[in-house]
Image (tube, grey):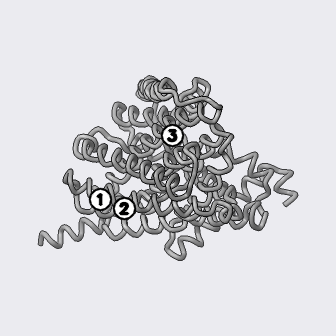
């Protein structure tokens, strides 16, 4: 342990080895690798066995999380193709909005009415409940080499709901912060949050077209290097300017993919380069979890989990049938949106920083919920994608289609 504390490079390598072994063990029992990363980090983290010391965790967590979430946001923007939006977009946008708002409302009401939580705690928690953890969905799709209509719809919905979640968080903080400071609700605070969101999109569009123009003059590794540089610069500049880095970088990814040329290989390269970053990110996320806090959260954790599951499995299913989405989408999609992990933890830390008066309550509930959802949801998502025949590039689905045609 002392070696880990004294040598950050050895510490980083050890964290990656722990995650790698956890991922391989998970794969051996047919679980997603990222579940193995998180469980391995949890078991060997400072709150359980202590192999990963707190000092190392504190030094690595923030920079690794910032880079990982930014890359994931960029890749999610690349999943929002104009062609997909034209074919499924209006229905999926409505689906994502209804799912997020319904989850927000049901969790908020449950926390206030059943768990007796204050508005200052219930609203931020309800906003976080809307997060579908694209940091879980994207690695699972990558691990399975999944491709097909359901996978495309899932990736797009995850990206859309993440945007909706950030908007709900911004609005909730704008409502709650003045109340905690001894003031009253201010409509102007909500307006400022909406302006910040619009500014993040505008900043992302500008940066996206600048990057797109530069990429046209480059090729190969030069494109990859410039893209990673732009992602990091955009993340930092967004923070300095008081904008949402998540929305800004996601917008950049959307612009580059849809208005650039021959960008498929670029996104594949970024995906490959990001693999060790994702391994480290999820292992550190697992090490950050504190199982001892679960009993302290009590009824609020139970209400949050139950209300979120009910919301995800009810409202969207009825609405999806109403707007005419495919059967697989409205039956299986809600189950694949239950995960909460890396992005959710990142957003939770942002909320805790913005609302220090209630940060302990929020962190306790969210840490407990993330442990629960991260253990049950990724395997469920993986099994659904496999069962629908879209793993391995959708070969199983194509085979079934050909057999039915024959």
Label 2 and label 3: CA atoms lie apart by 22 Å
Give the CA distance from mark 2 to mark 1. 7 Å
Residue shown at 54%/50% (left/top)? 344
Disc 1 crowd rating (10 Å Cα; few below 14, some 14-19, many 20+) is many
Q: Which residue is mark 3?
A: 169
Which residue position holds label 2?
A: 313
Q: How many discs appear?
A: 3
Relative image position of residue 133 (x, y in whole percent): 49, 52
* Mark 2, secondary structure of its residue: helix
In percent of width and height, residue 200 lies at: 48, 28
Question: Residue at position x 74%, y 52% from top?
Answer: 57
Asked if the residue under mark 3 is in contact with the one under mark 2, i.e. CB atoms within 8 Å, the reply is no
Residue 308 location, x and y as percent?
45, 58
Q: Which residue is mark 1?
A: 317
Say above or below: 321 vs 178.
below
- Which residue is rendered at x = 77% and y = 50% of the image? 9
């Amino acid at each position: 342990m002392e070696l880990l504390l004294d040598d950050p490079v050895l510490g980083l390598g050890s964290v990656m080895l722990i995650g790698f072994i956890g991922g391989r063990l998970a794969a051996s029992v047919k679980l997603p690798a990222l579940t193995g990363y998180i469980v391995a980090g949890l078991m060997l983290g400072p709150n359980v066995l202590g192999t990963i010391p707190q000092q190392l965790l504190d030094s690595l967590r923030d920079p690794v999380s910032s880079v990982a979430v930014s890359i994931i946001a960029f890749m999610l923007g690349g999943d929002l193709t104009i062609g997909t939006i034209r074919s499924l977009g209006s229905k999926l946008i409505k689906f994502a909005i209804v799912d997020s708002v319904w989850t927000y409302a049901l969790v908020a009401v449950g926390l206030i009415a059943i768990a007796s939580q204050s508005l200052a705690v219930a609203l931020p928690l309800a906003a976080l409940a809307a997060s579908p953890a694209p940091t879980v969905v994207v690695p699972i799709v990558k691990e399975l080499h999944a491709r097909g209509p359901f996978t495309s719809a899932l990736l797009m919905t995850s990206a859309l709901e993440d945007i909706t979640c950030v908007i709900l968080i911004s609005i909730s903080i704008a409502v709650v912060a003045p109340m905690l400071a001894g003031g009253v609700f201010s409509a102007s605070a909500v307006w400022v949050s909406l302006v910040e969101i619009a500014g993040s999109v505008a900043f992302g569009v500008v940066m996206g077209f600048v990057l797109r123009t530069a990429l046209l003059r480059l090729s190969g590794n030069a494109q990859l290097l410039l893209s990673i540089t732009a992602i990091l610069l955009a993340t930092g500049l967004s923070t300095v300017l008081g904008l949402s880095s998540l929305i800004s970088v996601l917008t950049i990814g959307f612009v580059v993919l849809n208005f650039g040329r021959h960008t498929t290989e670029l996104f594949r390269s970024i995906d490959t380069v990001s693999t060790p970053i994702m391994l480290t990110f999820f292992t550190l996320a697992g090490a950050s979890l504190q199982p001892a806090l679960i009993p302290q959260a009590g009824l609020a954790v139970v209400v949050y989990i139950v209300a979120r599951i009910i919301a995800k499995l009810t409202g969207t299913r009825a609405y999806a049938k109403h707007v005419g989405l495919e059967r697989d989408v409205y039956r299986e999609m809600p189950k694949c949106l239950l995960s909460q992990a890396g992005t959710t933890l990142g957003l939770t830390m942002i909320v805790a920083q913005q609302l220090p008066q209630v940060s302990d309550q929020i962190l306790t509930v969210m840490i407990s919920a993330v442990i629960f959802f991260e253990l049950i949801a990724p395997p469920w998502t993986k099994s659904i994608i496999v069962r629908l025949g879209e793993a391995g590039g959708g070969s199983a689905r194509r085979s079934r289609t050909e057999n039915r045609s024959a």
